[in-house]
Every structure is written in C-alpha cells, then in structure tokens.
Amino acid sequence: MKKIVDYILSCIYLLYFGLTLVVFHGLQVIAFHAFGKSAHKKVVDWMNASISYGWYLTGSSIRFQQEDELPTDRPIIFIANHQSMFDISPIIWFLRRHTPIFVSKIELAKGIPGVSYNLRRSGAALIDRKDPKQAIVEIARLGKHIQQTKHSAVIFPEGTRSSSGKMRPFVTGGVSTLLKRAPSALVVPIAVRGTGHFNPKGIFPLTSFSRMSWVVLPAIEPAGQTPDDVVRSAQEAIAQELGVSDSVMNQ
C-alpha cells in the first residue's frame, strides 16, 4: 500500500516539479536580460523555494536549522555531505543572503530547464571530472569570485552522492583550491539528512512522508590550519551531527 502511495504522490510532485522548472526557466531568462543579475538571483531563490516547499505534496517535511549568525562581510565556503540532487534547493533558499554558488559537474549545465540556465549564469564552477586541470581552473575562478564579492561557494567533498546515508571520505582538493583563492573565507559545514531516503534510486518513485533536514554547523576558522585539517574538522562535525561518526572514521 505504501508503495502505491509513493507512486501516486511522486507523479503529483514530479508534474509540479517539471512545471516549476519550465516556468522559472522562462522567468530567469526575462529577469536576466531585462533587469540584470540581481533580478535573476531573486527568481532563482524563489524557484528553489518552490521546489523545496513542493515536497509537502509528497507528505514529506523539511527542517532548516542555523543557530549561529554568519557574516556577510567575508566569503564563506559551505561544505556539505551529498545524498541527493534535492540537497541543493534548500541551501539556495535558506542561505540566499550569502548568494551560494555551487561547484557542479559540467554535465548539469545543459538540458535541465531552470537548473542548467542558472548554473551557467550564476558563475558556478562547472567541472569536468575527467579533466583535473580544467576542474582546478574552474574552482579557482569561483574562489577568486567569492573573495571579490563576499559571496559563498558550496562544495560537496564526497564527490558523488551517497543515498544510503553513509558518508564517503571527503576529498581536500577542491576546498584547498577555494581557500587559496579566497584566503579570507570562513568554512561552514552543513549536515544534510534524509534526502537520500527521499530520492534513493533515480527520480521515480520518491519516498513519501520522508523527513529531511539541513543543519548549519558552527563555523571553522581556517587561519592557521592546513586544508586537510579544515576538511577533516568539517567532516567530523557533519558525521557527529548525523550520528555516523564510526562509519566515517573506519573508512
């Protein structure tokens, strides 16, 4: 019976999701060309709010928790675990005052209404995993951008999704490059929970009545630490929040 409910509610949400992407794609194009980047960003923020709150159509819930106020006068590097493509929208919406810009695989820059256009226009670091040199250049460009603008970068150091909820080892390279180009950046871990359960295998069916949360953890001051130490601290903080410390330490 639950599986039938999953299929029905998934159909409802995915119809809503598709329409949201198409409508906001058009709004993004209009906003960018007629009113500029600021207007485009506002449209993107509301697109991601619509995606996130649309999950209520599946009976699922979202919770965002941020205890500490984050500065807006210095760049921020958000480091998060990665469970699903649905990790992203609440980060864009709830942290919109920090203008989060993502490190993303280059394949996503084409073919997805709303999403691909935003990746190209937002200045995202679009990396080719088969070309390490290109990836470093893109991430370095993003680091320089956030240093100049005091915006933020979002990176998933696991490198790929882990829908099981178990964390993969964090890779230091991307964060190290960002820190080199944005030396004044603050590093902030984000623990993402439940999106892998919601979206376990492909986009259909989704798991209805899932509980998803995003917890912004205490900031890490990278000054005086190596990138390896910073990434390790972020990984340990996320693992502790998710209650998977043992599995991470034993990998």
Image: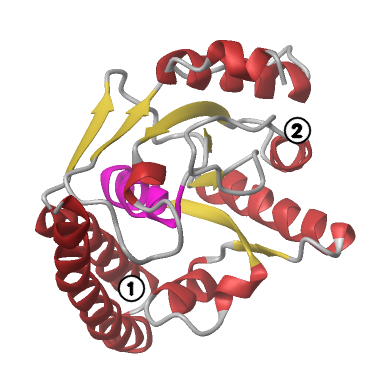
What range is drawn magenta here? 84-98
Residue 3, quarter of the rendered image: bottom left
* Position of residue 122 measured from the top left corner of the image (x, y, whole percent): 49, 67
Residue 176 visible in rendering: yes
In-front residue for pair 195/27: 195
According to the image, label 1 marks what residue? 40
Question: Which residue corresponds to the image point at 21% horizontal and 66% vertical from the top-left?
Answer: 7
In-front residue for pair 193/228: 193
Q: Nearer the observer, disc 2 or disc 1?
A: 2
Say the numbered circle drawn on residue 172: 2
**Does the magenta portion include 88?**
yes
- Left or right of 156? Residue 231 is right
Question: Which residue corresponds to the image point at 71% horizontal and 53% vertical from the top-left?
Answer: 139
Rendered-image quadrant of the C terminus? top right
Question: Which residue corresponds to the image point at 25% horizontal and 27% vertical from the top-left?
Answer: 65
* Position of residue 190 measured from the top left corner of the image (x, y, whole percent): 44, 30
Residue 222 visible in rendering: no
* Position of residue 21 measured from the top left corner of the image (x, y, whole percent): 30, 77
Q: Earlier in the sequence, mark 2 or mark 1?
A: 1
Badge 1 amino acid:
His
Q: Judge the density around disc 1: few (<14), some (14-19), many (≥20) Cα neighbours within 10 Å.
A: many
Instruction: Reply above or below: 201 against 153.
Output: below
Count of numbered labels shown in the rendering? 2
Which SS class for mark 2? loop
Badge 2 amino acid:
Thr
Instruction: Reply above or below: 43 against 181.
Output: below
- Left or right of 100? Residue 50 is left
Rendered-image quadrant of the N terminus? bottom left
Residue 231, quarter of the rendered image: top right
Tell me the CA gap for discs 2 and 1.
32 Å
- Would you say the magenta stretch is mainly helix, strand or loop? helix
